[in-house]
Amino acid sequence: MIKNAENLAALRIETPPATLREIALDRLRRAIISGLFEPGERLVERTLCDQLGVSRSVIREVIRHLEAEGLVEMLAGHGPIVARLDWKDARQIYEIRAALEATAVADCARSADAGVKARLRAALAELDRTSRQNSPPGILDATTEFYRIIFETSGHNIAWDIVSRLNSRISRLRVMTLSTANRTVSGPAQIREIFAFIEKNDPDAAAAACRHHVAAAAKIAEALLGKAL
């Protein structure tokens, strides 16, 4: 057989299958973010093994990973628990979001062409669809995709890396705020406003809309976390 670029390219695995650890990690991460496991709740290895159908070694790897993401914390004498949410940490996350997202949104608005606007419009359509279904997981995925396109377009790769590392905690806060009255309507509406200014290539107005959106979410989170204290 004659070797050529087409034959060799066929060897490449474009979408490698997820490992059992990756599947278990995604399932447990989503369970914590969605609130299925409450803040402060113990994560018992044996129970998780039965619930997820995996070995203890897999569960231990998953818990270590989630600890690094800030979703799990180790409590002396009790083992792993679901990390508690508090306003002190949440405020810092919202401050980081406001700074990084507003700058990325402004730069995206400056350079967004028809192709970028079409991709953002598609992400918004998915956000609208999942909002109508009142599906927090779908809303989270669509929102993440919307911002991923923005950071990619603006060339803010380092900033997106920082946001990605915080994404589990950001998503957890989003689910919490989405549970309040009208947030599944007001949140997407504010994101659509951000897009409207990107579509007009107006960086200042887009950044201001972004800061408003983050500040509105932060105000809700402060009220909720303050009640929990």
Image: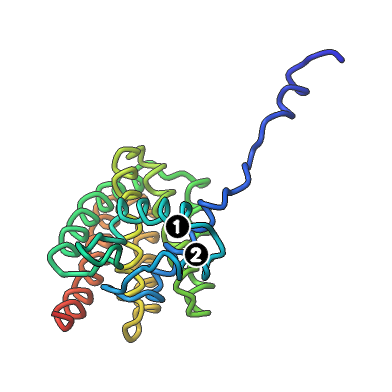
Q: How many marks?
A: 2
Residue 129 x %, y %: 54, 72
Measuring from the top left, give residue 85's x and y in whole percent: 22, 69
Q: Amino acid at mark 2?
A: Cys
In the rendered image, the vertical position of residue 152 relative to residue 57, given as above or below: above
Which residue position holds label 1? 59
Residues at badges 2 and 1 in contact (C-beta under 8 Å)?
Answer: yes
On-image quarter of the C terminus: bottom left
Q: Residues within 10 Å of mark 1 (few under 14, many from 20)?
A: many
* Residue nearer the viewer, 136 or 80: 80
> Which three-letter amino acid code belongs to the residue tagged 1?
Ile
Q: Earlier in the sequence, mark 2 or mark 1?
A: 2
Q: Say which mark, if any, is on residue 200.
A: none
The residue drawn where x is 79% and y is 14% is: 3
Image spot of residue 155 (x, y percent): 36, 37
- What residue appears at the point 30 percent right and 38 percent down from the top-left corner? 158
Q: Secondary structure at mark 1?
A: helix
Furthest-right residue in view? 1
The residue beneath circle 2 is 49
Under circle 2, the secondary element is: helix
Label 2 crowd bin: few (<14), some (14–19), many (20+), radius 10 Å? some
